[in-house]
Amino acid sequence: MELDELKLAWRSMEQRLDSAGKLGLQLYRESRTDRVRSTLRRLMAGQSLQVAIWIAVTTVVAPFWIEHRAVPHLLVFGLALHAYAVVTVVSSVLQICIMASMDYSSPVLALQRRLIQLRTLRIWSTLLLGLPWWLLWTVGFVVGVKHWLGIDLYATAPAFVWSNLGFGVLALMASVWLARRIARRAKETGEPARFADDLAGHSLRRAIGQLGELARFERD
């Protein structure tokens, strides 16, 4: 009887330890996923604001190029800014969709894959939407001055417009060269993540790192 009672006590202790371990893992998982959720909420808020801003831009730019469709340079400038606004909205909406579709009850590996997908999208979006601003600031300035002041800078000061566009082309080429050089050097040193994190955002890097800690905890 004493041996049977000892076995029962030992089995009961094992069950309690197992339950405590599962509870500890669950609490740890919830703490990490809550941090990830909080990070993504902030990113979603930023992307939602960006969507609102660029939709507002399209409400100004679309009527602009339609109204000035008979003037080639104003038509081209208006269409370029409109196209950029649409692409920016699409990029932000795609990022919001990825973040909104996160199922935090999924396995950690699935969550990591979604965040890596988001990270890749943000890297390419930053490059493809950031670099054109070397040219687009001039385009936007010309459109804005014509829209609000009624002054066609391209007609009244063509040297100003062309010089800024020319500088923008050179700066764009230099930026592409520099980005490729940094990426190549980072790859050679085995530390490409830092450059990518600068493009994707360090908050997203922290979120991926928190899931990595959770994955290691679950394996251990």
Image (tube, rainbow, N blue to C red):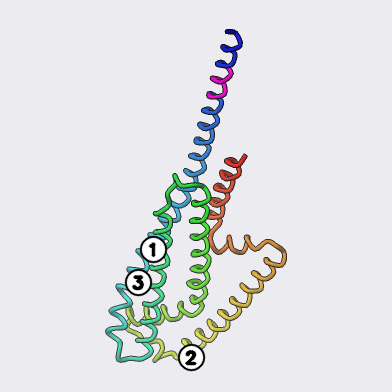
Which residue, given by chain and number where applicable, does mark 1 sit on? 93
Residue at horizontal 39%, vertical 78%?
81
Q: Nearer the viewer, mark 3 or mark 2?
A: 3
129 sits left or right of 82 in the view: right
Residue at horizontal 48%, vertical 91%?
159
> Is 11 a magenta residue?
yes
Which residue, given by chain and number where applicable, does mark 3 sit on? 57
Query: Where on the picture, by quarter, is residue 197?
Result: bottom right
Q: Position of residue 169 (x, y in %)?
A: 54, 83
* Magenta-drawn stretch, dominant element (helix, strand or loop): helix
Label 2: which secondary element: helix
Q: CA distance from mark 3 to mark 1?
A: 16 Å
20 sits left or right of 80 in the view: right
179 sits left or right of 28 in the view: right
Q: Which residues are magenta?
A: 10-15
In the rendered image of this protein, does residue 149 appear above or below residue 216? below
Instruction: Mark 3 or mark 2: name the one nearer the start of the chain.
Output: 3
Q: Amino acid at mark 1?
A: Val
Q: Amino acid at mark 2?
A: Ala
Q: Amino acid at mark 3?
A: Val
Return the residue nearer the eye: 208 or 49: 208
Q: CA distance from mark 1 to mark 2?
A: 38 Å
Q: Nearer the viewer, mark 1 or mark 2?
A: 1
Query: Where on the picture, by quarter, is residue 54?
Result: bottom left
In the rendered image of this protein, does residue 116 appear above or below residue 127? above
Q: CA distance from mark 3 to mark 2?
A: 27 Å
Q: Quadrant of the C terminus?
A: top right
In the rendered image of this protein, does residue 108 appear above or below residue 142? above
Q: Which mark is residue 159?
A: 2
